[in-house]
Image (cartoon, rainbow, N blue to C red):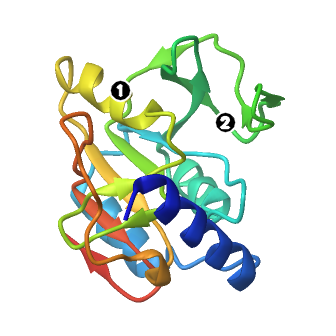
Amino acid sequence: MLKSKLRKKILLIRKKKNNKNLNFLSIKILKEIKKNLSKKLIIGGYFPVNFEVDILEFLKKLEISGFKLSLPVIKKNNKMNFYRWSYNNLLKLNKYGIPEPEPKEKVYPDIIFIPLVAFDNRLYRIGYGGGYYDRYIEITSNKKNFLKIGVAFSYQKISRVPTNKYDKKLDIIITEKYILR
């Protein structure tokens, strides 16, 4: 099945299931991340839209624990960069209506949490089709090693994501039921 058809199908399912305020990035996962990382690390998050998994409370806990936060800012030519962000900072809407920080302090996160539409056991994902994360991963991987964690509901899993040379594999995918590595 084509990515565009898969994307529409999974987005419709996600909208119908709409688990409001489901925050499954549990204390257990927070502890696992914290025990393996230095608090000096920068976390790249996302602002949830379109019924994505809401990670905002999780990000807040990380910031309270001493981690530095950042969010993506969309640029021209389907590119994006991450900029320093704190819960004390205001956000502005980008052209897609997604809140993002002021592009003042560009950073390169050590861990990036990535929203996704669909995924498979091989740790490949389908996003919204703009290629923002795949481009970011490609460009940034040449400058820095970082952990790529996909966040989704278990029902977003499909048997096989169609891939091409531009698609980037994730390191981990976390759902409310399991963690894929």
Q: Position of residue 46 (x, y in %)?
A: 58, 45
The answer to whether residue 33 is visible is yes
Left or right position of 85 against 10: right
Identify the residue shown where x is 29% and y is 62%: 161
Q: Closer to the camera, 95 or 56?
A: 95
User: Which image quarter holds the C terminus?
Assistant: bottom left
Q: Is residue 112 above or below residue 6?
A: above
Q: Amino acid at mark 1?
A: Arg
Considering only order in the chain, which callout, 2 or 1, is on the residue closer to the N terminus?
2
Left or right position of 1 against 167: right
Q: Is residue 110 above or below residue 154?
A: above
Identify the residue shown where x is 43% and y is 34%: 131
Cα–Cα span, label 1 and label 2: 25 Å
Q: Amino acid at mark 2?
A: Ser
User: Which image quarter holds the N terminus?
Assistant: bottom left
Q: Position of residue 62 (x, y in %)?
A: 52, 54
Q: Which residue is mark 1?
A: 135
Q: Quadrant of residue 15?
A: bottom right
Q: Which residue is mark 2?
A: 86
Task: Tell how many labels.
Answer: 2
Q: Position of residue 165 (x, y in %)?
A: 18, 36
Q: Is residue 54 above or below residue 26?
A: above
Q: Position of residue 173 (x, y in %)?
A: 33, 66
Q: Quadrant of residue 28?
A: bottom left
Q: Closer to the camera, 129 or 70?
A: 129
Would you call the spot at circle 1 few (<14 residues within 10 Å), some (14-19), or many (20 or more)?
some
Q: Closer to the camera, 85 or 171?
A: 171
Q: Nearer the viewer, mark 1 or mark 2?
A: 1
Classify mark 1: helix, strand or loop.
helix
Left or right position of 20 against 180: right
Classify mark 2: helix, strand or loop.
loop
The answer to whether residue 117 is visible is no
